[in-house]
Amino acid sequence: MASVTRDNSSEQTRGRWFALFAYGFRPFFLAAGVYAVVALLIWLHALAGGVWPTAFMSAIDWHAHEMIFGFAAAAMAGFILTAVPNWTGEGGFHGWRLAALALAWLAGRLALNPYMPLPLVWGAVVDLAFFPLLVLTVLPGLLRLRTRRNMIFPFLLLLFWSGNLLFHLDQLGLLQASARTGLFLAINGLLVVLALLGGRIIPAFTRNYLKSRDLSLTLESPRWLEISALAALLAMLLLDLWQVESLAAGYAALLAGLLNAARLLCWQGWRSWRASIVWILHLGFLWLPLGLLLKGLWLVWALPIASGWLHAITIGAFATMILAVMTRATLGHTGRSIVAGPMTALSYVLILVAALLRVLLPVLPPEVYQAGVILSGAAWIGAFSLFLLAYGPMLLRPRVDGKPG
């Protein structure tokens, strides 16, 4: 009798065609993919001389804000809402609570859209509501878990919110020159998140892949290296908070870059060259030390070749790792084999091309700059369009194995 009940439940699960709010990653990974395309198209339109409202924030401020607090925030929310249930062993976030959280993120994007924005003060209020709601959603589970190492994530989310607050206070004229400080606070906070998560998932996924090929390796970096690399990133965060792009922050970036490069070497990514779903994690993380080293070279010695350091971090490290994690997590959490198909592999190549082009642009002849920006933007749009084509249906529909989630 019990087996009949399970079979009926399974059939009901398979019969549902819409599962967008069945698990935390679904609405936010879809939102990140859609907004990556939409926000970039708006930015390229503004860059090409399109109409931009004069009473609104500048186009470059909007672009910087939405890439961090819109696109990256959605991806980060999807990951955390999926990871916390895995850590706690409890049921995932779903239903009306998840839908309400997704609507809070969407409300922020609509409130700050450049063509029909709310007044800046109300746009700020709506936009700032998302991260406190996200923290309140995941905090009870983390408190029940009682694992101190995971409690850093609510703190980093609030740090991210503080950066957003500083940005809006500047836009409202309440705190002069704080927008850039707020952006750097959020960017550096994301670097810390990336360094922490990279150290957890990249060696583990690489080890699992190698084990499937009958090769057992530890792939662990020494604890002193892990602590030192994180400490250097936190030092850079504090120095940038004290004074954005200071000489001291440049030296901290150089140290953090070298230490994180050493971590990456310990994970032996070259052994995974046959599996694009694995090597993209290593290449994505490679942009982190590269971006930090370029930042140090720019701030300390003003080397022209390093002037594209910010896009090395934001496109190279952030966007590549976001795409890598979203594809892998979507496959795994929808009951599919974790293997990147041709469309997925092409999206990886395109995001790497977008990053490389954007980082090299400052050293290319000025007459090709505009074309280079457009080509980089087209590669970005192509990468996330392929993600939406391949993974959009997976995010909308139930798991193929009939399980909940």
Image (cartoon, rainbow, N blue to C red):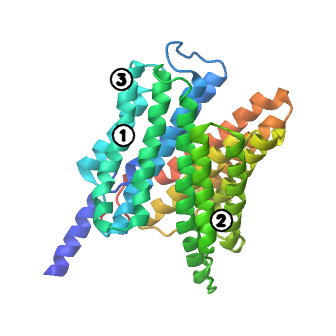
Q: Which quarter of the figure is the C terminus placed in?
A: bottom left
Of pointers 1 and 3, the one earlier in the residue sequence: 3
Q: Residue at x 21, y 74 (%)?
A: 6
Left or right: residue 339 compared with residue 272: left
Q: Amino acid at mark 1?
A: Phe
Visible residue check, residue 42: no
Q: Which residue is mark 1?
A: 130
Mark drawn on residue 107:
none
The image quadrant of residue 233 is bottom right
Q: Residue at x 34, y 64 (%)?
A: 85
The image quadrant of residue 230 is bottom right
Q: Secondary structure at mark 1?
A: helix
Q: Which residue is mark 3?
A: 122
Image position, residue 11 (x, y; %): 25, 67
Residue projecting furthest to the right: 365
Q: Which residue is mark 2?
A: 279
**Residue 300 vs residue 93, the one in the foreground:** 300
Between the C-alphas of marks 1 and 3, the distance is 14 Å
